[in-house]
Structures are given as structure tokens and as C-alpha cells.
Amino acid sequence: MTTTVWDGVTRTLHWGLAGSSLAALGTGFLAPEWWLPWHVAAGAVAGTAVAGRGIWGLFGPGPARFGAFVLHPRAVWHHVVSAARREPRAHYGHPPAGALMAVLLLVVVAALGVSGLVAHGGREDLGPLHGVVGGAAGAGAARVHAWLAWGLLALVAGHLAGVAAESALSRDNLVRAMITGRRANAPAPGPAERRPARPRAALAAATGLAIVAAPFAVGHPVTAGRAVSPTHSAAVAPTDPAYKKACDDCHMAYPPGLLPAESWRRLMANLDDHFGENAFLMPGTKEKVRRYLTANAAGTADTEAARHFRHVDPAAPLAVTETPYWRRRHAGIAKARFKAAPVKAKSNCKACHRDATSGWFRDAAIDPPAAGGGPPRKQ
Ligand code: HEC
Ligand code: HEC
């Protein structure tokens, strides 16, 4: 006789969370930089599923409720030991180790969501926290995010192994049970597992959460295309009219955050021999431009790019494209790619970075065709 153990909401949230987490792991670990919007979208779905599961854990039917989870360390230990001894199973809903795994998975995915939001706000100036967190906080959050992602991979492996072992010991296909909701050999439910769902309370909680979260989500761009959020850009994009007039002719006016102050000082002192060109300026203009560039040099702006471009190659301190960071980030791109149209030169940042003039160099604004992801784009 089959028994219905898992209700439709629990199953939908389970598979929604599984699918979106796998998509986020895949895009996070394997996809190129410019897939970031898809990674963020998968993360947003996973975060929503965790929030939903949290609410359903409070108001859902018995087996789905956190109240029915047996998490006591001794119970978990006994459960694992009895599995090692191949003792038969008598758990209706989650067995203790399964309940602990479910909680760990939910907590880690939630932490991935939070660290991802901070990283996205700080490093990319996008998402609900754009303009709120700085580049240093974003970089720290990104590091935590990466560690948590490895942790999630390990948990997923443990979860699959646990389900396989538990299926064998209980003589029930627990994967199918999470799909159909029904178990063939389920024992009788415990008292906590008989509690009915409170759908109206769950709906009220979900609505409340949505109302609180909506203002953060609405009006805040998740992705960056041609139009990117202007909040922080003003601080890092070349805004000084004298600078733009003087240096926007032969190449784009590089955002000042791409070189440290000392490099700008030296570059401005040698304009008559500027990469083989004469970039002569009247003394008054030259002084204005020099002051602007040094005041907004790398290290002063709090963007990911400006934090990294503080370090130059002593042998070529005036070239952005010779900095260790630039070389590292572009090491994977074929040399021919830079020479071919529409790029033509390494220094032509705009050809591959749609937001180059903003100074942000967001992942989502990298142009895959120009960067080597397909046929070159016509300009
Ligand atoms: C007469 C044309 C001309 C003008 C005007 C000019 N530049 Fe340049 N600049 C060049 C050339 C040519 C290069 C070398 C580009 C290359 O290597 O692909 C260059 C390279 C650079 C680089 C290094 C880019 C890299 O490869 O990393 C910086 C930084 C730079 N210029 C800043 C400035 C600034 C600041 C001004 C305004 C004071 C300015 N340029 C005005 C022609 C010019
Ligand atoms: C041929 C295309 C191309 C050109 C030209 C180019 N880039 Fe890039 N850039 C890329 C690609 C592709 C990546 C992503 C590399 C990766 O996967 O790590 C990247 C990454 C970056 C990053 C790191 C972005 C991040 O947030 O992870 C920065 C900063 C950057 N480029 C700055 C520049 C600057 C400054 C210039 C001009 C001086 C420039 N790039 C010229 C293709 C290009």
C-alpha cells in the first residue's frame, strides 16, 4: 500500500531548489564571465525557493515542518550508526541525518544568496545592494561565496549518497517518493508528522515577505546591458570636461581608476613622447587634467577594477594593459583576437567591454563576440 508523504508544495520547492542550485553551481563554476546574469537569475530562484521552504517548514503539513525534524546530535549519530549496521528503517518523513542535511542545505543556499547579493552590489554595482556596499566588502563577500559554493557541492554529494543509502535500507525509492509524493513502504507517521498544513498562515507569511522584499527588488537592475545603473558610475567614469576634451581623441578617455596616481603623474609629464605620439596640451589644461587624474586614480575609487589597478608593472608603469591584473585577466584571450577588427588593439577596451567608459568593467557587459565567444561583432 502506498502512502502520500510529501505534499505538492514541498515537492515543488524541493525540485525548484535542486534545479536552480545546480544551475547556479554550473554557471558559477563553469560558465564565462558574461554569463553572470544567468548565474544571478538561478541564484534568485534558489533564494526564493529557500524562503518558500522556510515558510513551509513553519506552516506546511507535518513531515515538511521543521518541528518534525529530529536534529538532536545523539539521534543523528544513532541514525548513522544504524545505517552502517544495515538495520532496517522506520522513518515516515526525514530521518535524523536527512533532516540535518535538509537544514544544512537550506542554510548554505541562503548564505550563498546573501553573500552573492553583497558581492553583486559591491563588485558589479548591481542588484538590490548596488550603491550600498563598497568594493572591498564585495570582494570579501565574493570570497565567502566561493567557499560556500564548494561547501554546497560537498553537501549535495553527501545528500545524494544519503538518499541512496536510505533508499536501499528502507526498500523504498526515495527519489521517486520526492517526485510522486508517495512511498511504498512507509511506516506510520509520528505525532508531529500528522499535523495538518496551515496554508492561509503560509500565504500570509509569503505575502508579508514579498511586500518587505519588493522595494529592494523593484527598480534595481539585476543585469547590465547597454544601460547600466548610474548610481556609482559618476564617481569612477571620466566626468571632467577638460580631461575628456584633451584625452578622448586618439582613444577613449580612460577612467582614471585604471592607473595609480604616480603613473598618471609620469604620463602627464611626458606627453610629448606619449606611446610614440605627441599629445601636447596647453600648460593650464595639462595641470587641470593632471590634478583630475591623480585625484581619482586607482585606489581612490571603490570599484573592483580600481582596487586591482593600483599595481603596475615597474617596467611599463604607464600602460594599463601591462599591469599584472590586466595581463592575468586577459591571459585566456588569443593574441590574434586583439589585432583583428573590430578590436585592433589591447588598449581598445570599449570593443569588448560595453561599459568601459563607466569604469566598472562589469562581467555582464563583456561582449562575447568581440571577446572571442563567437564571430566578431561589427562596430
Ligand atoms: C595623439 C593621440 C593621443 C592623444 C591625444 C592621447 N593619447 Fe594616450 N595613447 C595614444 C596611443 C597611440 C597609445 C598607445 C595605444 C596602444 O598601445 O594600443 C596611447 C596609450 C595610452 C595609455 C595606455 C593604454 C594601454 O595600452 O594600457 C594611456 C593610459 C593613455 N594613452 C592616456 C592618455 C591621456 C591621459 C591622454 C590625455 C592627456 C592621452 N592619452 C592622449 C595616443 C594618444
Ligand atoms: C578582446 C577583448 C577585450 C579587450 C580589448 C579588453 N578586454 Fe578586458 N576582458 C575581456 C574578457 C573576455 C574578460 C573576462 C576574462 C575572464 O574570463 O576572466 C575581461 C576582463 C576584464 C576585467 C575583469 C572584469 C571582472 O570584473 O572580472 C577588467 C577590469 C578588464 N577586463 C579591463 C579591461 C581594460 C581596462 C581594457 C582596455 C585597456 C580591456 N579590458 C580590454 C576582454 C577584453
Image (cartoon, rainbow, N blue to C red):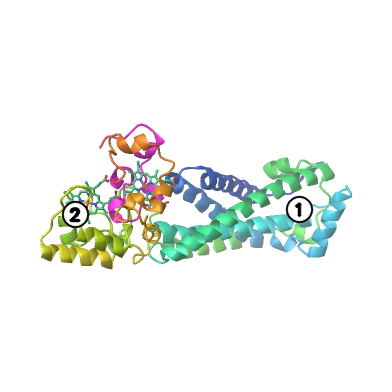
Left or right: where 210 falls relative to 197: left
Left or right: where 40 falls relative to 359: right
Q: Is residue 115 above or below residue 335?
A: below
**Which quarter of the rendered picture does the N terminus lie within?**
top right
Find residue 172 and report its horizontal and vertical position in percent.
Answer: 80, 42
Q: Cα distance, mark 2 to mark 1?
A: 68 Å
112 part of magenta stretch: no
Q: Which residues are magenta?
A: 348-377
Q: Is mark 2 within 8 Å of ligand 1?
A: yes
**Which quarter of the rendered picture does the C terminus lie within?**
top left
350 part of magenta stretch: yes
Q: Which mark is residue 93?
A: 1
Find residue 194 and report its horizontal and vertical position in percent.
Answer: 76, 57
Q: Residues within 10 Å of mark 2 (few under 14, many from 20)?
A: some
Identify the amino acid type marked 1.
Gly
Q: Which of these two is toward me, 374 or 87? A: 374
**Residue 185 seen in this snapshot:** no
Please tell me which residue is depicted at 88% across the width and 47% down the height of the picture.
86
Please tell me which residue is depicted at 82% across the width and 54% down the height of the picture.
80
Q: Residues within 10 Å of mark 1 (few under 14, many from 20)?
A: many
* Circle 2 SS class: helix
* Circle 1 SS class: loop
Q: Which of these two is toward me, 241 or 185? A: 241
- The residue at which mark 2 appears reads as 247
**Residue 148 seen in this snapshot:** yes
Identify the amino acid type marked 2.
Cys
Please tell me which residue is depicted at 67% across the width and 52% down the height of the picture.
155
